[in-house]
Amino acid sequence: MVNSGQRPVVLVTNKETPEKGIHKLKLKCDVIFPKNHPATRDEILELAGQVDGIMWVGHMPLNGEVLDRGGSRLKAISTMSAGMDYVDVEEFRKRKFPLGYTPIVLNDAVADSAIGLMIAAGRRYHEGRLAIDQSQWKGGPQWLLGQDIKGSTVGILGMGGIGQTIAKRLKGFEIGQLLYSGRRTKPEAEALGAKMVPQDELLQESDYVFIAVPLTNETRHMINETTLSKMKPTAVLVNVARGDIVDQKALVAALKNGTIFAAGLDVVTPEPLPAEDELLSLPNAVVIPHLGSATVQTRNNMAEIAALNVLAGIAGTPMFSPYPY
């Protein structure tokens, strides 16, 4: 028996979900987990029909198949993420099915990571470490010179919550100019001293380019051979959004032939990235394994918000953080 009584049952799809969120669920529900770790899709689908709610932890496709298997008993689902590219949002919209997510709470952690990648890539930290490892520490006044941040022009592709938080972090670096591009002018961005410009102008003028847009059909491979060729040869590209926003083959070529100076990447394609991938062989590519929101407090907060979403959805009340479909 999955249900031990009259309490609702919630499936949490990953056993490593922070206890803060699990505890919140257990106050009002019985909580179950898949037997395997990582869970298989088949066992998640099998359990979906035996529960009232699901906390969807991870980037396994979340679509109509899950809703079909959940049937009439399943009342609510919340992801534990801000990015929703793995979710068939249209299917949820058509069915008017309660869907929650966890934006905003991860903005600070992701922005911190973005600034770290900016510095690491611009100042050639990875290349320097390789020199140490290979006994090639040469020193000298012209050795491993990087790019300055003070006085630079910084462009942010996507001025949502994460983009705005990055902009706030940049205040202390005394940059010269802050540019952004998007569908519309944002008063919040203007208040931070940012100027909206066309994407081409942003790429041509920026010394540092941050990618902070969601992955959609429109943004997939928006950074490609053509757009990379518009950037300065001294420019640094930082991606903390999704790997597929960048044409990775084109980026590898651009880094190898000097089209751009360096890249700092928290997201790549595929994930996990095979150890033998050519991207990892490049000295001017700083690559970390999707750690943007990976702080103790941030993940605890994400789990708690996802739990609140599921509880509200089961109760038929508005979610704490509903996805705006």
Image (spheres, rainbow, N blue to C red):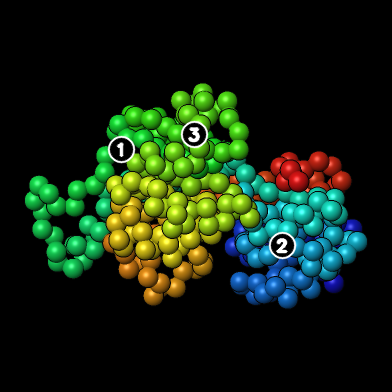
Disc number placed over residue 88 in the picture, else none = none
Residue drawn at (73%, 76%) of the image: 42
- Of the numbered discs 2 and 1, the one sitting upstream in the chain is 2
Please tell me how crowded label 1 is: few (under 14), some (14-19), or many (20+) other residues with Cα within 10 Å: some
Residue 260: image x %, image y %? 33, 52
- Of the numbered discs 1 and 3, the one sitting upstream in the chain is 1
Comparing 232 with 19, the one in front is 232
Disc number placed over residue 149 in the picture, else none = 1
Residue drawn at (65%, 47%) of the image: 102
Which type of secondary structure does the marked residue at label 3 adopt? Answer: loop
Residue 26 appears in which quarter of the rendering?
A: bottom right
Question: Circle 3 sits on which residue?
Answer: 197
What amino acid is labelled 2 in the image?
A: Leu
Disc number placed over residue 62 in the picture, else none = 2
Which type of secondary structure does the marked residue at label 1 adopt? Answer: loop
Dots 1, 3 in contact, CB < 8 A:
no
What amino acid is labelled 1 in the image?
A: Ile
